Image (tube, rainbow, N blue to C red):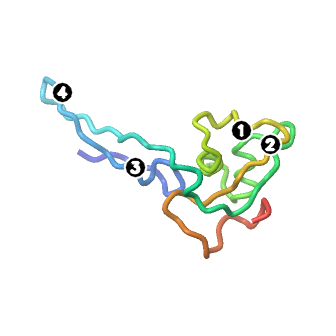
């Protein structure tokens, strides 16, 4: 059974699938659980201060070059509920995704990276 995969910039791109067989024999493919990485294990690429009216997707677009990458900000700041990070005045870490190390050209260079 095939399953449509997530795009490479999705937080679920590297998450595996599993299969469950129901009592009637029907097979159901599902996405395994994604665990939030320990923020201390992620490589920082900068910081950004939240301004009034900011949203994580806009912060990600301006600082990482892609609004879909908002999940990187949530991961880098240990947030299970991303909108809790949208408090004006709060300083947020910008990080690489789990498993990547520094040394490349990431994002668009914004956010003090």
Q: CA distance from mark 3 to mark 4?
A: 22 Å
* Secondary element type, mark 4: loop
Q: CA distance from mark 1 to mark 2?
A: 7 Å
The first of marks 3 and 1 along the sequence is 3
Q: Which residue is mark 3?
A: 15
Query: Is 6 located above or below residue 113 in the figure?
Result: above
Q: Which residue is mark 2?
A: 90
Q: Label 4: how many residues lie within 10 Å, few (<14), some (14-19) or many (20+)?
A: few
Query: Is 26 located above or below residue 46 in the figure?
Result: above
Are the residues tagged 4 and 2 within 8 Å (C-beta)? no
Residue 8 is left or right of residue 28, and the answer is right
Q: Which residue is mark 4?
A: 22
Where is residue 12 drawn, in percent x and y? 46, 48
Q: Label 3: how many residues lie within 10 Å, few (<14), some (14-19) or many (20+)?
A: some
Are the residues tagged 1 and 2 within 8 Å (C-beta)? yes
Instruction: Give me the disc on residue 85.
Output: 1
Q: CA distance from mark 3 to mark 1?
A: 24 Å
* Secondary element type, mark 1: helix
* Secondary element type, mark 2: loop
Q: Label 2: how many residues lie within 10 Å, few (<14), some (14-19) or many (20+)?
A: few
Are the residues tagged 1 and 4 within 8 Å (C-beta)? no
Which of the 4 image quadrants contains residue 30?
top left
């Amino acid at each position: 059974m095939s399953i449509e995969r997530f795009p490479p910039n999705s937080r679920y791109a590297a998450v595996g699938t599993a299969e469950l067989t129901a009592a009637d024999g029907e097979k159901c493919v599902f996405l395994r659980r994604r665990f939030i990485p320990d923020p201390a294990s992620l490589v920082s690429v900068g910081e950004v201060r939240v301004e009034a009216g900011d949203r994580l997707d806009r912060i990600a677009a301006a600082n990482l070059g892609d609004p879909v990458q908002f999940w990187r900000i949530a991961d880098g700041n240990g947030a299970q509920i991303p909108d809790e990070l949208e408090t004006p005045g709060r300083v947020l870490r910008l990080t690489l995704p789990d498993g990547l190390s520094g040394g490349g050209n990431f994002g668009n260079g914004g956010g003090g990276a």
